[in-house]
Every structure is written in structure tokens, then in C-alpha cells.
Amino acid sequence: MKSEKIKRIINSMGELPTLPTIYMKLTHLLNVSDSSIKKISNIISEDQAIAAMVLKIVNSAAYGFSNKIGDLQRAIVILGLNEIKNLVLATSMYKIVNQFEPSSAFDMQQFWKHSIGCAISAKVLAETAYIKDPEEVFTGGLLHDIGKLIHATYLRGEFNDVVADVVETGSQMSESEKKYWVLIMLRQGVF
């Protein structure tokens, strides 16, 4: 790959979307001592999709309430601030992920399911191991494959070649990526 193309790709990375304002506001509010459930509720209510998701989760069978909870403040108290923060992050990431137009070899739904599954598993393992901040581990699990999304979006042809190699050889994605990039570097005379 030519250095001009690499520079162009890196420069376009500045166009990656940032986390929505609601997540930033909520994170800030959760880190100050004078935050209240009412203030948190007001921030969440700014985004109807997130507010609906909070109510949907609190009314799910997992919580087992006989009466439907329709009050956002009560839902926040029941779920807890850390769960609310994780939920807002996951919902925000879902919105960001769906803004990308990845290659045809990239299954957005599978990527999202995998990311959420890793985030939840990482958090459960962190809690089991008594790690200090399992929420940070959740975030790491959620974002651990973000490079694949960037690769599939900005280097579609190369990404499709890597995926084709994975399908053909049955190798791991990371092995095919290494093999593919070594071949490119050899062709470019880097080695």
C-alpha cells in the first residue's frame, strides 16, 4: 500500500463519529458529587431511544416486576447508575456503528452482537474476579474490535481479501490480516 493512501486513510479517520452528547453529559454528571436522579433522568429523556430502552429493560422478565414501570427516575434507581451508564454507552455505540457503510464482507448485526456479548462477558468476569471497575472492562469489551469496523469501512477491498482468506483457509482473522499485510509490504519493498 502506498504511503499516500495510508496518509489519506489516517487523515480521514478524523471523520470518525464521536460519542453522542448524551453519553458525554451523563458521564460528566455521574462523576460530580451533586448529581441527582432527576438530573440524570432529564439527560436520558433528551434521547427518546435511550429512554425507551431503559424502560424496556427495567420491565423485562429479568427484573420480574408485576406492574409495569413507566417512570424513568424509578427505572434509573432500579437499574443503578453503572447499568444506566453502560446502557447509554452501548446504545450510543450502536448508533455510531450503524452510521458506517462497511464492506459487503462485514456483517454489521453480527459485529454488534459480538461486541455486546464480549462487553457483558467481560463485565461478568471482572465482577467475579473482584476487579475494581467492571464498567471499564465492559467498555473495553464493547470496543475491542473497533479496528475491524474501521478496516471494513476505510479499506474495503483489503478487508474483503482478508475475509475471503479466512473463509477459504479457516484461519483466524488476525492470522489472515498479518499474512495479507506482510504480502502487501513485500510487494511494496518494505522488507
Image (cartoon, rainbow, N blue to C red):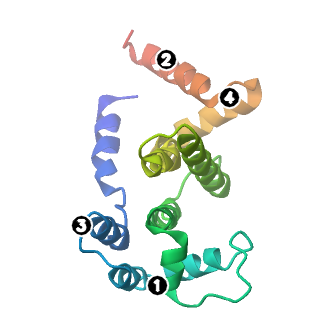
- Quick one: label 2, few (<14), some, or many (20+) residues within 10 Å? some
Q: Nearer the viewer, mark 2 or mark 3?
A: 3
Residue drawn at (28%, 38%) of the image? 7
Q: Circle 4 is placed at which residue position?
A: 165
Percent x, y of residue 91 = 51, 67
* Distance from the alpha carbon under mark 4 to that under mark 2: 14 Å
Quadrant in the picture for residue 29: bottom left
The disc at residue 73 is: 1
Check disc 2 and give the amino acid type: Val
Which element is circle 2 on?
Answer: helix
Percent x, y of residue 88 = 46, 68
Quadrant in the picture for residue 4: top left
The disc at residue 32 is: 3
Check disc 1 and give the amino acid type: Gln
Question: Is residue 42 depicted above or below 191 in this figure?
Answer: below
Q: Circle 2 is placed at which residue position?
A: 182
